[in-house]
């Protein structure tokens, strides 16, 4: 038996224990999501080259404190009408963590890949082993932020708080940018923030 064969299981065990322990957690908060009391509501309507763009709020969302695992701006690609419009409407992507995933240690042990498609899609693919994916579930979210308040871009390692709406974006009466309503699962959320702060 080689040393590599002997120590590899021990190394995996040590890494998983560190991930489970998650020292230096920055936040124990969880996002609070509430459906709109009177059903979905249009909160903004604009026009781009004669095409109607409607922002429809389906829930309110608030987060007192979340750790920024990844931050990126203007990542839509391509040249079609929808891509150019969506890049302007939803320019900011933040991968946020809380609880175990608000630790700089555990968020670096967690392996993921960001995918940006030429059709304008932006998503996260989890590449970690089953143990880490299971432990991260419900403790992180990939969030697309609209920018009606000219928010300052955070950097990796910052903590942020925000309030606003989870929204669906309709272009020419077609829902081209739907939001998920369960922040923390494998789907993405689109947030229209009314308040956004980078915390000390």
Image (cartoon, rainbow, N blue to C red):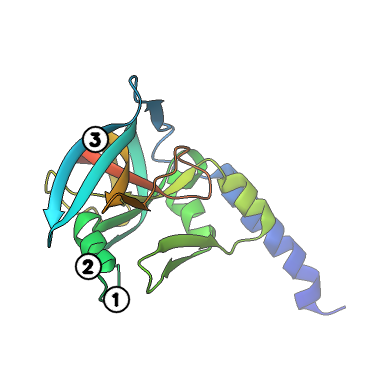
Quadrant position of the N terminus in the picture: bottom right
Residue 177 placement (x, y as % from top left) = 35, 53
Question: Looking at the image, which residue is at 58% across and 64% down?
Answer: 127
Residue 188 placement (x, y as % from top left) = 43, 50
Regarding mark 1 in the picture, which secondary structure is present there? loop
* For marks 3 and 2 on the same chain, the one whose residue lies earlier in the sequence: 3
Regarding mark 2 in the picture, which secondary structure is present there? helix
Crowding at mark 2 (Cα within 10 Å: few <14, some 14-19, many 20+)? some
- Which residue in the rendered view is the most extreme toward the right? 1
Mark 2 to mark 1: distance in Å? 7 Å
In this image, 140 relative to 66: left or right? Answer: right
In this image, 1 relative to 29: left or right? Answer: right
Mark 3 to mark 1: distance in Å? 28 Å
* For marks 3 and 1 on the same chain, the one whose residue lies earlier in the sequence: 3
Crowding at mark 3 (Cα within 10 Å: few <14, some 14-19, many 20+)? few
Q: Are circles 2 and 1 on residues that touch, CB within 8 Å?
A: yes
Question: Which residue is at the front of the view, 5 or 137?
Answer: 137
Question: Which residue is at the front of the view, 195 or 158?
Answer: 195
Regarding mark 3 in the picture, which secondary structure is present there? strand
Residue indicated by mark 3: 42
Question: Which mark is drawn over residue 84?
Answer: 2
- Name above or below for residue 38 compared with residue 122: above
Question: Which mark is drawn over residue 199?
Answer: none
Residue indicated by mark 1: 78
- Name above or below for residue 66 compared with residue 129: above
């Amino acid at each position: 038996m080689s040393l590599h064969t002997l120590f590899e299981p021990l190394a995996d065990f040590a890494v998983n224990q560190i991930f489970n322990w998650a020292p230096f957690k920055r936040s124990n908060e969880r996002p609070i999501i509430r459906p709109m009391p009177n059903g979905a509501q249009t909160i903004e309507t604009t026009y781009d080259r004669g095409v109607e763009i409607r922002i429809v709020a389906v829930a309110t969302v608030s987060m007192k404190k979340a750790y920024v695992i990844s931050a990126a701006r203007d990542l839509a690609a391509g040249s079609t009408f929808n891509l150019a419009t969506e890049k302007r409407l939803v320019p900011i992507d933040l991968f946020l963590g809380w609880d175990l995933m608000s630790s700089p240690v555990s968020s670096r042990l967690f392996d993921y890949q960001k995918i940006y498609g030429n059709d304008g899609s932006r998503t996260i693919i989890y590449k970690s082993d089953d143990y880490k994916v299971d432990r991260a579930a419900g403790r992180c979210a990939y969030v697309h932020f609209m920018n009606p308040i000219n928010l300052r871009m955070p950097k990796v390692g910052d903590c942020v708080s925000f309030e606003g709406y989870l929204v669906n974006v309709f272009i020419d009466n077609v829902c081209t940018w739907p939001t998920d309503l369960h922040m923390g699962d494998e789907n993405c959320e689109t947030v229209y923030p009314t308040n956004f702060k980078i915390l000390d």
